[in-house]
């Protein structure tokens, strides 16, 4: 039996292609709200970031997330992104 194909996504900061499970998704919900999606299954437009603080800082500096999602980041999500990926990996058993 052939191994199962893993979906690939690209980090908006470093442009590195990785498996979907290795990245953290920022999603624009259908109602227009923005949130971090640790499951990768929420409905809406997504932008992916590596689980590396340097990518998060680069994405914020360049405005890559806003460009990918076509909207401005709300203050609460901006604060979460500035805090870095380690704040979000602690509660996730998969580390993503």
Image (tube, rainbow, N blue to C red):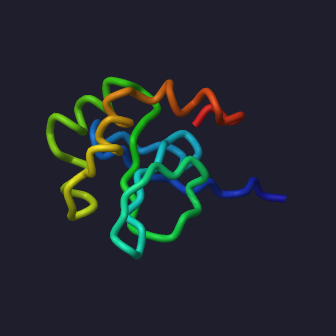
Image position, residue 87 (x, y; %): 50, 27
**In the picture shown, does residue 58 fall above or below 46?**
above
Considering only vertical position in the picture, is 41 above or below 90? Answer: below
Q: Which residue in the rendered view is the most extreme toward the right?
A: 1
Residue drawn where x is 61% and y is 52% of the image: 39
67 left or right, relative to 88? left
Q: The N terminus is located in which quarter? A: bottom right
In which quadrant of the rendered image does the C terminus lie? Answer: top right
The one of 27 and 16 positioned closer to us in this rendering: 27
Residue lying at the far bottom of the rendered structure:
30
Is 94 on the left or on the right of 24, as rendered? right
State the residue at coordinates (61%, 27%). Answer: 90
Q: Is residue 9 left or right of residue 93?
A: left
Residue 75 falls in image quadrant:
top left
Front one among 24 and 72: 72
Q: Residue at x 56, y 55 (%)?
A: 40
Q: Position of residue 9 (x, y in %)?
A: 45, 52
Please provide percent x and percent y for residue 37: 51, 52
Give left or right: position of 60 versus 89: left
Where residue 70 sits: x, y (%)?
21, 64
Q: Who is closer to the viewer here, 20 or 24? A: 24
| Looking at the image, residue 81 lies above or below residue 5 | above
């Amino acid at each position: 039996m052939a191994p199962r194909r893993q979906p690939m996504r690209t980090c908006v900061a470093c442009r590195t292609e990785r498996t979907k499970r290795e990245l953290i998704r920022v999603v624009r919900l259908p109602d227009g709200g923005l949130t971090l999606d640790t499951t990768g299954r929420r409905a809406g437009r997504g932008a992916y970031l590596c689980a590396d603080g340097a990518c998060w800082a680069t994405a914020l500096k360049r405005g890559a997330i806003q460009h990918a999602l076509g909207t401005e980041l709300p203050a609460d999500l901006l604060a979460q992104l500035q805090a870095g990926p380690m704040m979000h990996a602690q509660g996730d058993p998969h580390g993503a």
